[in-house]
Amino acid sequence: MYSGASNFVEGVDKAFMLIMGISIFFLIGITTVMIIFLFKYSRKKNKKPSTNDGSIKLEIIWTAIPLVLVMLMFYYGWVGYAPMRKVPDDAMLVKVTGKMWQWIFEYENGKTSPDLVIPLNKPVRLDLYSPDVNHSLFIPAFRVKEDVVPGYDNYLWFTPYYIGDYEILCAEYCGLMHSYMTAKAKVVSQEEFDVWLADFTPIEKESEHPGLLIINANACTACHSLDGTRLVGSSFKDLWGAKKIVLVKDNEKEITVDEQYIKKSIYDPDAEVVQGFNKGLMRSYTGVISEEDANKIVEYLKTLKK
Amino acid sequence: MSGLTQEHAQPSYLDQQGKYKGLLGWIFSTDHKRIALLYLYTIVVFFLVAVVFGLLMRIELFFPGQDIMSPQTYNAMFTVHGVIMIFIIVIPGLSAVFGNFFLPILIGAKDVAFPRLNLLSWWIFLFGAILAVLSQFAGSGAPDTGWTFYVPYSAESDSNVVIALTAAFVLGFSSILTGLNFIVTIHRMRAPGMTWFRMPLFPWSLYATAWIQVLATPIVGITLLMVIAERTLHIGFFDPALGGDPILFQHLFWIYSHPAVYVMILPAMGVVTEIFPTFSQKPVFGYTAIAISSLAIAGVGYFVWGHHMFTSGMSYSARWFFSFLTFIVAVPSAIKVFNWLSTMYKGSIDLKPPLLYAISFIFLFMIGGLTGLVLGSLATNVQVHDTAFVVAHFHYIIFGGMGFGFFAGMHYWFPKMYGRMYNIKLANIAWGILFTGFNFLYFPQFVIGMQGMPRRYFDYLPQFQVGHFISSIGAFILVTGIILMIYNLIRSAHKGEVAPANPWRGSTLEWQISSPPPLENFDEIPVITGKPYQYNTDDLGNE
Ligand SMILES: [Cu+2]
């Protein structure tokens, strides 16, 4: 477990060891004493209980010793933590957007990626940004976590020490697909990273369809891909005009995807459930997406058909 | 046995005939003992509901992927489980049941200071509880925000958040009124000769608790109202989309909810403090230290709320300052543990079910408290915050502490409350199953939490499978224990052997009156001449 995947592992794990060590010592010690008392002073053996009801000296001792120990623990925790707030100047900057329910990592040259690709042994600073609700970026192997709060400029940083793939999880509850809001941190060599970073086509902002903007703003893409991959819901690619089997109150029915069907799916998704997908996952967007915006979505979906 | 046979002028509170008969005689009774039982029954019913939700969640988590419910249902389930457990059971629990029943008796009074207000508190409580249930079924779907109602999600989720918030708000009122009632009762109603430092320690813990209830609950009340205003009137307090500050919500929420943890645990500490001396037949060790440490916990406990927010984006100085105070507040709890232990030292220990529960309280509470240090330390908090580790930690504190404290109190005072004794052998067996199940259920969550299993996850990565599996097995064992325990108590309330006035050789006032107590507790208000917990042990040899 303690593989030392980042520069913080040692400090954090030292604090773990110290606190757990002291804790286990006291837990076992006190429990043992308690059990010994139960036997040694059981009513069978001891019919003359003492009448001693206190001792100032003992009270002072068992106030002072725990006080010293907890101060020690506090100190170790603080020492392990303080560097997490001091970002080195040469850290590579990555802007992280956490939104319902996906992570997007954006590099300084404009490249975006669903996974965090980073070069070995180089400090990275993650600037955390959320357009919707609270999330929390958590990379257990690196011992880092910081909440992603709308309106706040939170950040975290670390230096990865080993090449490999590590889990990125969302630790702050953020609604329906919270547990699926995961990504990978991929630590690669500097050379590999440079090649990867250079390889992309910048998105031309002005060409974005108004319907796509609405789809992005409402995070439909967390469940519906635009490129044919199957996520929680079906892909929007080639959706328009497709023939599908849907379940209406458990009865199968064949439909063709048209304007009316798409709108119904947006406003009342559980009325007609596409075969092979689960009901109850997509919320109704009644009151969230206006009729006008729904039309734009329909227009955009038309453009996704070859 | 002390050989006291009581003949009271009045009938027992169970047989008493007031203005109303039957059920009405209960729900309109202002007798503190009847009100205590009203709370008890309400709480048990809701507890069982929340237990079922907990069990269903554990079944879902047996294996990765979707098993028996959808993510939306799961999210609603942990929200409702949390809301019911925290606001209906754990916060009011011990004060409302054992506080109501025994506070007046322990200080030699006929009732609380404001008996009608006391009844009103129960009615408000019932109303809040019904609202909480309603929020599950009425309108747009069960709330799915978690019991913490974090903004902005709670401002945006289109589930039934407003009713759930109102329920929490109403329940808060009941809690404030009970607290107020207890403070006045303790100040004004102590029997002649009962000075502050002759008062038993359970009332001391209730006193510290009541102050927290009165001072802290209004803050969460206002906060919840602000969220309601935000949702309905779109006033931007917390939601950044409306120009608010989401972290402000977290501060306000925890300013209440952290002290609330002490509302849960302090009375439980008070209960076991009564049990150790009785079953050791030895005066409590360090009376003053235990009394003062309750006040210290209540006092310092106000200023540690920030430890729930170390990763929220608070300033760096706030982070280390809250961490520092969090470590300080651990000390008074440690003092109590040492004093309980010393109470047993050289005692004459009778290991009956109440004591079994009390020592397992110490064990579980220690695990909860010590893992709290892991959470209070900045470096380690980063790793375990918002993971299964936190879930395990607070279940050890709340269930292992408050819950086992409640069970301890139940088995201690049962013969007094119902005038009948439960089956001791069965109680021991139920305890064994409960204790085993408890540790199987929650301990693995420490391990997977440290490995990075976040909380409130409907689904999980395959490496957490073993931990989840063991935990789910533990849930079944635990529930078996609970059912057996409740069965034993319910059966014995009707059919148990008739209990004597003082089955455990207790020395506090409740054991000087008959079981069950008469309507106004004492025919004549007792006069107190010395410290509590003095035992006459000359006849121990003859037993
Ligand atoms: Cu999230």
Image (spheres, helix red, strand yellow):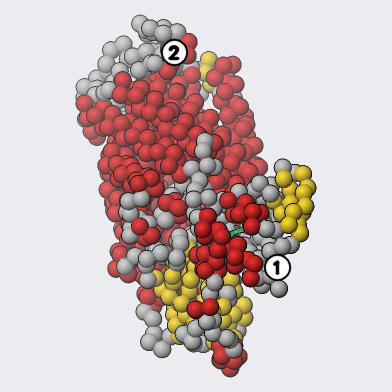
Q: Amino acid at mark 2?
A: Leu
How packed mark 2 is, by other alpha carbons closer than 10 Å (few <14, some 14-19, many 20 or more), is few
Please state which amino acid type lies under the numbered disc 1: Asp
SS assignment at label 1: loop
Q: CA distance from mark 2 to mark 1?
A: 67 Å
Counting from the top left corner in percent of width and height, residue B170 is at 37, 35
Quadrant assignment, res A222: bottom right
Q: Nearer the viewer, residue A68 or B122?
A: B122
| Labels 2 and 1 touching (C-beta < 8 A) | no
Between A198 and B127, the one nearer to me in the picture: A198
Q: Check the image and report above or below for B48 versus A5.
A: above
Q: Residue at x 23, y 33 (%)?
A: B196
The label on residue B177 is none
* Mark 2 lies on residue: B24
Image quadrant containing the N terminus of chain B: top left
Residue B329 pos. (x, y %): 33, 54
Of residues B83 and B448, the one nearer the viewer is: B83
